[in-house]
Amino acid sequence: MAYDSTNIFAKILRGEMPCHKVHEDDTALVMMDIFPQSKGHTLVIPKAASRNLLDADPQTLSAVMPLVQRLAIALKAVTGADGIRLAQFNEAPAGQTVFHLHFHLIPVYEGVPLGAHAGGKADDAELAALAADIAASLQP
């Protein structure tokens, strides 16, 4: 299938929709997931237009993965999580719901089950505070 430039992440990247931004550079936007599976659930969205991993330019992938790693380190430090789950879905049967390549970084806490994907909207004030804390901890 072809890339659809009207998807919500493309709109966010163009500034047409709001988000709780953690970080932005020439390669990607990092933002809080407004329907988190756990406290600190964050998304890394490459700016290059691709539907998912299957059609992504390898240069985009190599440019964004260091940011994914930096974010995982910052998330673990800020949230006190016991681990970080990295998830990325390709096509609807695999669980993809927004058809723009993106990576989920989900803090995992021992003994605490993850919430359902898109199970409930988080509090905007809490997301804004977390975004600021993670941004301050994100190493260059």
Image (cartoon, grey):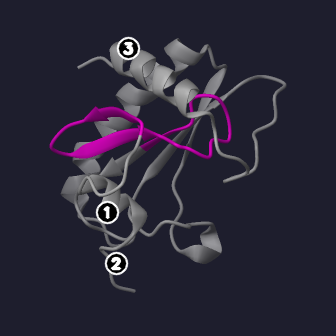
Q: Residue furthest left?
A: 26
User: In the structure shown, which secondary structural element does the residue marked by tag 1 occupy?
Assistant: helix
Position in image of residue 46 (x %, y %):
29, 52
The quarter holding residue 43 reads: top left
In-image side of 138 versus 82 (left or right): left
Residue that badge 1 annotates: 10
Quarter of the figure that contains the N terminus: bottom left
Using the image as rendered, state which of residue 33 and residue 140 is in the foreground. Answer: 33
What amino acid type is highlighted by mark number 1?
A: Ala
Q: CA distance from mark 1 to mark 2?
A: 9 Å
Tell me, for residue 54, which label it has, or none. none
Q: Which residue is mark 2?
A: 4
Residue 76 in the image, given as x and y percentages of width and height? 54, 19
Q: Amino acid at mark 2?
A: Asp
- Residue appearing at x 30%, y 74% in the figure: 5
Give the residue drawn at x 30%, y 68%: 50
Specify start and end residues of the magenta stretch as a single range. Answer: 20-43
Residue 122 in picture, x, y percent from top left:
63, 38
The residue that mark 3 highlights is 137
Q: Quadrant of residue 29?
A: top left
Q: In the rendered view, would you say 63 is above or below 112?
A: below
Magenta region includes residue 118:
no
Q: Residue at x 72, y 24 (%)?
A: 109
